[in-house]
Image: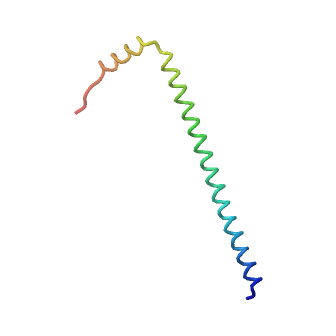
Amino acid sequence: MDIKQENIERIQTRIDMIRQESRALSYRIERMTEQRKALSQEKSRLKDRLEAVNSIPTTELIEGTKEALANLSIRG
């Protein structure tokens, strides 16, 4: 095999490796984008819960806690 053919094969091999790496990166980007979306949704749900808890008057929270404690039973 001559030098020109060896260079061509080396370059083609490198191009194939770059394509494979590019595919892998695209997959990871897609997966991370989905994870980021899920985290954003979870953050939004938690913010909504926090807002709901903050809107409950303190006296209701105290009464709810007292009622929950009164109904608490220890299982053995």
Extreme-front residue of the structure: 3
Which sits in the foreground, 15 or 46?
Answer: 15
Decide: is 2 above or below 45: below
Which quadrant would residue 12 be assigned to in this image? bottom right
Describe residue 11's horizontal placement relative to residue 35 as left or right.
right
x then y, percent, for residue 51? 53, 21
x then y, percent, for residue 19? 69, 64
Which quadrant would residue 4 be assigned to in this image? bottom right
- The quadrant the N terminus occupies is bottom right
The colour scheme used here is rainbow
- The quadrant the C terminus occupies is top left
x then y, percent, for residue 18? 68, 65
Describe residue 45's horizontal placement relative to residue 72 as left or right.
right
x then y, percent, for residue 33? 62, 45
Which sits in the foreground, 11 or 51?
Answer: 11
Extreme-left residue of the structure: 76
Describe residue 64's horizontal placement relative to residue 38 as left or right.
left
Decide: is 1 above or below 17: below
Residue displayed at 70% across by 76% down: 10
Residue displayed at 69% across by 73% down: 13
Residue displayed at 37% across by 14% down: 62
Describe residue 70's horizontal placement relative to residue 14 as left or right.
left
